[in-house]
Image (tube, rainbow, N blue to C red):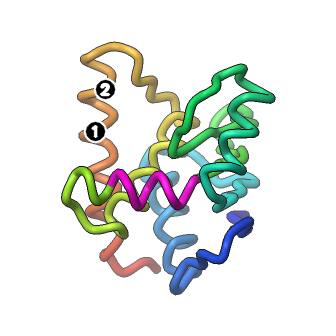
Amino acid sequence: MINFHYETTFQLDQPALYQAWIEQCIKSEECQTGELNYIFCDDDYLHKINVKYLDHDTLTDIISFDYTEGNVIGGDIFISVERVKDNSAELDIPFGDELKRVMIHGVLHYCGYPDKTKEEKTLMRQKEDEKISMFHVKHS
């Protein structure tokens, strides 16, 4: 089950489309959807989590807590909408594209894709692009 929670005024348009897309992405990695919670928030909210749980005193666009068991994907994904907006402006890409990239990035980690090395980062970006391209595919 995929749930969306909001700790800010931001709301996803057509959340059912995002749910279907994420489920399809998980299925395409030969995994199953467990309980997956997206929490959309602002910089301050995410910064407090970063300091409290990760001991990082920095801003970030995403923090994920992985509860995956075997191939059943689950976790809590916190996304700073402010960071995503700033990143999309800095990268000169549409906000919706950057939001999808961040949303699926956490799921890809849960599916077993790390991004510490240069090679891992390259593969992660390729996987993100592949999954973003699936967004417009009609889901059954």
Residue 48 in which image quadrant = top right
Location of mark 2 (residue): 121
Is 70 drawn above or below residue 117 in the view shown? below
Q: Is residue 10 above or below residue 110?
A: below
Distance Cα–Cα, label 2 vs label 1 = 6 Å
The amino acid type found where label 1 is placed reads Arg
Q: Is residue 20 left or right of residue 94?
A: right
Decide: few, some or many residues near mark 2? Use Cα within 10 Å; few <14, some 14-19, many ≥20. some
- Return the residue found at the far right: 52
**In the image, what residue occupies the spot 68% across and 69% down?**
8
Q: Which residues are magenta?
A: 80-87
Indicate the quadrant where residue 110 lies.
top right
Q: Secondary structure at mark 1?
A: helix
Decide: is 8 above or below 54: below
Q: Assess disc 1: are there few (<14), some (14-19) or many (≥20) residues with their C-alpha within 10 Å of its C-alpha.
A: some
Per the image, the residue denoted by label 1 is: 125
